[in-house]
Image (cartoon, rainbow, N blue to C red):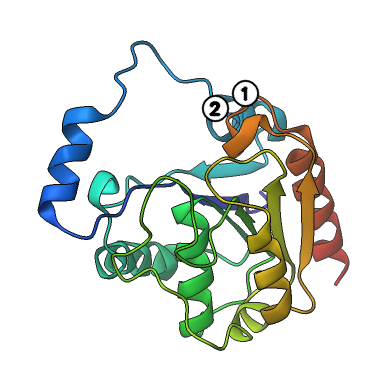
Amino acid sequence: MEEKIQILMIHGGETFNNQNDYLNYLKTKKIRFGKKIRWSEDYLKRELGEDFEITWPRMPLEDNARYDDWKILFDRYIEKLGDNVILIGRSVGGIFLAKYLSENVLPRKIISVYMIAAPFDNTVTGWTLTGGFELGEDLSLIGKNCGKVVLMFSADDDCVPVSHAKKYREKLKDAEIIIYESKNRHFQVGEFPEIVEMIKKDVVLSTKS
């Protein structure tokens, strides 16, 4: 029996400068009822099929995230992963992967990493990027840890401006950067066929290398 391709997905989160800002967020955040339709859950599992094992860790305190907390849990997942792994991070999850992969040598090479609407720095709209997620100067280790590095942005994103794509480009010369005309702003879509196609191609190429 062939080993399944493992996909480890890190969702977004919120960061705050202090406790008062966090409490104010809880008091004013929009309340929604019903299940959210996300491309990253049922859709992705359905489209990729039984050859893939998809895991969505519940990262610590997602509404008041701290990098050091996330790293502790992520380290434990990394220790348990097999040889055929794809990483996906969205928003804060994306910059988390960028920071982690640029600061840690992984025990095995990752097939590919997708960082979706990942902020590069604190020039974001409507919130503050803090909590230790700030990137260092040298991101070159990301390419050494991963066979393929892809960053995706949406031109109509009202949270992470596409100007962040250029900032990543200056640090990651070999990365593939894709800017979509619209992915419903911050990739709030129910389907994402482009990433499904790319992941399947990644797997084919990895078996030939």
Image coordinates for residue 75, horizontal then vertical, percent: 36, 70
Amino acid identity at mark 2: Arg
Q: Is residue 136 above or below residue 100?
A: below
| Quarter of the view holding residue 162 | bottom right
Q: Residue at x 44, y 64 (%)?
A: 122
Element on which disc 1 rests: loop
Marking on residue 116: none
Amino acid identity at mark 1: Gly
Q: Residue at x 62, y 41 (%)?
A: 157
Element on which disc 2 rests: loop
Q: Is residue 160 above or below residue 157?
A: below
Q: Is residue 104 visible?
A: no
Question: Residue 47 versus residue 120: which sits nearer the camera?
Answer: 120
Q: Residue at x 75, y 49 (%)?
A: 199
Gap between marks 1 and 2 measured at Cα:
5 Å
Image coordinates for residue 167, horizontal then vertical, percent: 66, 71
Check disc 1: other Cα within 10 Å, few if <14, some if 14-19, many if 20+: some
Check disc 2: other Cα within 10 Å, few if <14, some if 14-19, many if 20+: some
Q: Residue at x 32, y 71 (%)?
A: 132
Q: Which residue is mark 1?
A: 190
Question: Residue 202 versus residue 172: which sits nearer the camera?
Answer: 172
Q: Which residue is mark 2?
A: 38
Image coordinates for residue 11, horizontal then vertical, percent: 45, 46
